[in-house]
């Protein structure tokens, strides 16, 4: 159709690179999320809030590497910190002060975090937080929200993108994400309906004897950054305490909402929190932190109860980029960013109203999502019922108009 024709006409070099890429990389890339038909554009460079592709088209970048570049691309102070560190060595076998400073910043800013450990991706952050919960409670099952994404390891890859026809119409359903996952994942990962406290409470009580934790994004990214109901979160906090479950907030994305993350804004304090993206200033990063008694399971000085190893954990390149970023994220900056997000959502709604297109614009602060449906978005299933073909059209069409 015309959007695709215009796109291919203006991106010939990307088409060539994609064809070449497909010879060496399955599907032409090591990452899936930025793929869109007929092929993604290849970036040549980025600056501020723009990316420029290999054909010279300039785009306004609303993705910013999946919400990572909270200060835009190639922020001066981040680039300077990375340049300076690179000249002094990229990483070492013993600690560097930058790790202490970034840990200090997170402990001071985030209400739930008394101690923290760094790793290289959000995936490793959630993996280790769950590992800690299992070790602490001696129980192996976990509970997550149907439709929630917490990275790419086996124990969170349950009912993330499961289609409607794979789901029990009445009950939250655990479905493995790909063939060959051990059958135990669907037994060991219990799913919950977002914002539905009655079924959540019933399922947690039924499984409490085997459950170690509940992991949830307080602002659920896969639902278009839909904030959890305050009452739902508060009740989950009470229930997890009553049942002896570790309550984990995945703030890999929502940490861009305030200095203390979504937990500070919503006034619900989990036992552990996972991080990624923003805290590494654009370098590969992940972290998890929380109550000292939980985090001390990883204390290596006495021989850890739970192991967490990794060649590049807390590497100084990431730590200095993260520090240079957090230093600039003052309360005033968050206030401005969040206000701009409010304006963006209001204007998007006005544009779609004017065009008489049924949409739900979801989100909070600088995070937003668009769903082509008349139905209010409340959970995984309402997201799945929206019109995906329209979304694809918007994506390709938008790329063209911005260029
Ligand atoms: N958790 C959430 C909420 C995420 O959005 C992501 C990544 O998009 C992750 C975990 C995994 O982080 P990473 O891609 O760094 O492994």
Image (cartoon, grey):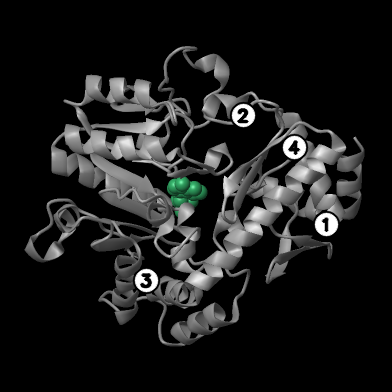
Q: Label 3's element?
A: loop
Q: Label 1's element?
A: helix
Q: Give the CA separation, mark 3 to mark 1.
A: 37 Å
Residue 100 found in image quarter: bottom left
**At 34% across and 62% down in the image, what residue appears?**
110
Q: Give the CA separation, mark 3 to mark 4.
A: 38 Å
**At 33% across and 40% down in the image, what residue appears?**
234
Specify the farthest residue to the top: 169
Which is nearer the eye, 395 or 89?
A: 395
Q: Please state which of the two labelled residues, at mark 3 or mark 1, is closer to the viewer.
A: 1
Q: Earlier in the sequence, mark 3 or mark 4?
A: 3
Which is nearer the eye, 204 or 301?
A: 204
Q: Position of residue 282 (x, y in %)?
A: 52, 66
Q: Earlier in the sequence, mark 2 or mark 1?
A: 2
Q: Earlier in the sequence, mark 3 or mark 1?
A: 3
Per the rendering, the mark at residue 392 is: 4
Where is mark 1, residue-wise?
402
Q: Earlier in the sequence, mark 1 or mark 4?
A: 4
């Amino acid at each position: 159709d015309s959007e695709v024709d215009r796109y291919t006409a203006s991106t010939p070099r990307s088409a060539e690179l994609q064809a070449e890429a497909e010879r060496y990389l399955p599907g032409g890339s090591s990452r899936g999320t930025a793929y869109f038909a007929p092929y993604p554009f290849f970036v040549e460079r980025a600056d501020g809030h723009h990316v420029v592709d290999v054909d010279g088209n300039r785009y306004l970048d609303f993705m910013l590497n999946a919400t990572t570049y909270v200060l835009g691309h190639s922020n001066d102070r981040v680039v300077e910190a990375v340049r300076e560190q690179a000249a002094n060595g990229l990483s070492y076998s013993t600690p560097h002060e930058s790790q202490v400073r970034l840990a200090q910043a997170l402990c001071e800013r985030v209400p739930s975090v008394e101690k923290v450990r760094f790793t290289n991706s959000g995936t490793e952050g959630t993996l280790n937080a769950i590992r800690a919960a299992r070790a602490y409670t001696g129980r192996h099952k976990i509970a997550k929200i149907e439709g929630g994404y917490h990275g790419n390891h086996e124990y969170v890859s349950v009912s993330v993108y499961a289609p409607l026809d794979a789901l029990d119409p009445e009950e939250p359903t655990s479905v493995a994400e790909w063939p060959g996952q051990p059958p135990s994942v669907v037994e060991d990962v219990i799913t919950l309906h977002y914002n539905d406290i009655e079924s959540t409470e019933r399922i947690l009580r039924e499984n409490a004897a085997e459950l170690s934790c509940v992991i949830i994004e307080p602002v659920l990214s896969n639902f278009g950054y839909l904030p959890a109901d305050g009452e739902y979160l508060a009740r989950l906090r009470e229930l997890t305490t009553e049942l002896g479950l570790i309550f984990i907030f995945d703030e890999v994305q929502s940490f861009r909402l305030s200095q203390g993350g979504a937990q500070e804004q919503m006034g619900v304090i989990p036992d552990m929190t996972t991080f990624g993206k923003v805290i590494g200033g654009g370098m590969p990063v992940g972290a998890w932190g929380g109550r000292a008694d939980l985090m001390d399971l990883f204390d290596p000085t006495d021989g850890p109860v739970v192991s967490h190893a990794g060649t590049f954990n807390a590497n100084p390149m990431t730590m200095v980029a993260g520090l240079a970023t957090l230093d600039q994220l003052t309360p005033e900056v968050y206030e401005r960013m969040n206000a701009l997000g409010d304006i963006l959502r209001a204007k998007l709604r006005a544009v779609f109203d004017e065009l008489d297109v049924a949409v739900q614009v979801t989100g909070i602060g600088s995070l937003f999502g668009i769903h082509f449906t008349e139905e209010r978005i409340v959970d995984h299933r309402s997201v799945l019922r929206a019109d995906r073909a329209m979304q694809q059209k918007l994506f390709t069409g938008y790329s063209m108009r911005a260029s």
